[in-house]
Image (tube, rainbow, N blue to C red):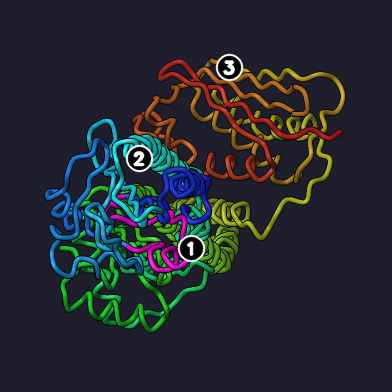
Amino acid sequence: MSPQPGWPDSPARDALQLIAEGVTQVAGFGVAAISVARDDGKLEVMAVAGSDAAREQLQGTRTPIDRLQRELAKADDWGLLRFVPHERLDPGIGDEWGWVPDLVPLDVPDAWHPLDLLIAPLLDEEGVLRGTLSIDLPNDGRRPGEAQRRVLNQYAEQAGRAVVTALEREGLATRVRLAEAARKIVRSASTGAGFSVDEVIAESRLALAEGFQAYGMWIQTFDEDGLGTGAIYSSDGTRIELPGELVGIAESAARRAWKFQRVEVVARELPFGPSITAEQGELTLAFLDSIGIGSILFAPLGAGPECLGNLVLTRIPGAPEWSDVEGAAALDIGHDLGRAILNARAFEREHQLVEELQALDTYKSQLISTVSHELKNPLTAIVGHLEILDSSADLDPHTRASLAAMDRGAHRLVRVIDDLLLLSKVGDPNNPVIPAPVDLHRVLDEVVDLTSVAADRKGLALIVEAPDGPMIALGDAEELTRVCANLVSNAVKYTPKGRSVRITLSRVGDEVVLSCSDEGIGISTEDQRKLFTEFFRSTNPEAVSQPGTGLGLAIVRRIVERHAGRIEVHSELGSGSTFRVFIPAAS
């Protein structure tokens, strides 16, 4: 595997080329070549100097390291150099080197033979082979003497440092490039709250293709949630169709790869990894051949124990091979993308649930409105006929008591239906408030007048504190009147005899504030959490004993919210309650 796709045009390669050229110009040899060790156990020729023919045949060729080491075991030790006379080489080895000079040996004892091997293994500080300097075709046609060997050893030392430095620089550049790609993926994943799966992949695909210098890519997601979210996305953002057999192969291979936390490289010259069988690999290679792709890096996507898809990065024939560094980066990015996809799917499910709940709420509102309208007409007829019957002069006391009971029940049903209709109206998003100036001082006076009878009956003191003059808010007069009426009537209802209810009206900044405080039974902390929910009745037995539908405060909340206001409640059980309503003031 090649650790760096960017070598062909890199400064590091230029440095190696200069060293090779120095050998040919100063050390008295016609050809010098520098090779670099690859992760796949081969040496790749990166710089050739001195002969165009040698360069054409050697540049980019790859030789197995173990094959070279077998030959070096027969070599003479010349310091950093190793020399293997042609008579010690295995038969046919010259064909494997890729280039043999067209040279007729001199008729002298130390004559250079075309198959003589002079090579310097280039090692790092840990003694790991990082490359080789190969030298051929001496200008004088002789094997080098002591003086020439010293010069060659100096160049071998320089070449070793250059190769190690070049590999480190190119490895660092690769890691920086892949880290940048990973950073973009992580940023997409972390800032993608609210992103759909399509959007997460759209944010990621360019960073992936650029970061890995891939010819192309695609991402396959699995239909884990049964909602048809499995799809295959290409590098240009379009959904693509793979042969059905390959889709199944990719899915099963991804699950195995995720289980063992590994990536797979599929290429013609490589064995198939444990995640892909030989038969599956051949089918994959046939497909790659059909679309002009030389190799792929296959990485699973997932989060925790769950495999969610796979990432496929492609390169064309002749492109550098995939490195271990790139494989590790692809696996890390598979984790990042997996979390992003999992988050996106959770958001999509939540969004779908919200839509379903909204549809259900709309249906509930429509049902309440329809039923209320259907009940209102017959109830109006019932109330009217009860009034007619009650006006008859020949009714006995028992009948008149029954009519009175029916009338009370009918009027209670009318109030419930009116509350339901109002609840439906103020909860309808298609029925917005048309704001107009409303004098809340005047509204409050009217509400207090209407409530004073019930307050007097209980001996309650209604205390109103408001500045002189109008107190103008923006909103719907009828709805704001209902807010005041519900709060004041509740305070009167739940306050014991002989106590007081205090109502204040004030202007605070850009808002008009209505406050209603009582000395009543109070509301528990647990009940306060559900206080503004439709049909909620307190768990306090004293509150339950009072008649009510549980709709009054729900209506108040909806009206306040649709007026762009807010409501606050402060209460302790047994110590009374204070409700504060904030409504935008008119300028």
- Mark 2 → mark 3, Cα distance in angstroms: 115 Å
The location of residue 504, given as percent across then percent down, is 69, 21
Examine the structure image and report whether residue 529 is included in the region drawn in magenta: no
Residue occupied by mark 1 = 198
From the viewer's perspective, is the residue at label 1 or at label 2 nearer? 2
Q: How many marks?
A: 3
Please identify the quadrant where the C terminus is shown.
Answer: top right
Say which element carries label 1.
helix
Q: Amino acid at mark 3?
A: Ser
Per the rendered image, the range of residues in magenta is 37-61
The location of residue 578, given as percent across then percent down, is 56, 22
From the viewer's perspective, is the residue at label 3 or at label 1 nearer? 1
Please identify the quadrant where the N terminus is shown.
Answer: bottom left
Residue in the image at 13% along x and 63% along y: 90
Residue occupied by mark 3 = 500
Decide which of 559, 229 is in the foreground and name it.
Answer: 229
Residue occupied by mark 2 = 148
The location of residue 73, given as percent across then percent down, is 12, 48
Decide which of 262, 165 is in the foreground and name it.
Answer: 165
The location of residue 324, given as percent across then percent down, is 30, 50
Residue 556, located in which quarter of the rendered image? top right
Residue in the image at 66% along x and 60% along y: 430
- The circle drawn on residue 53 is none
Q: Amino acid at mark 2?
A: Gln
From the viewer's perspective, is the residue at label 2 or at label 3 nearer? 2
- Mark 3 → mark 1, Cα distance in angstroms: 62 Å
Q: Looking at the image, can residue 176 be seen?
A: yes
Q: Amino acid at mark 1?
A: Asp
Say which element carries label 3.
strand
Say which element carries label 2.
helix
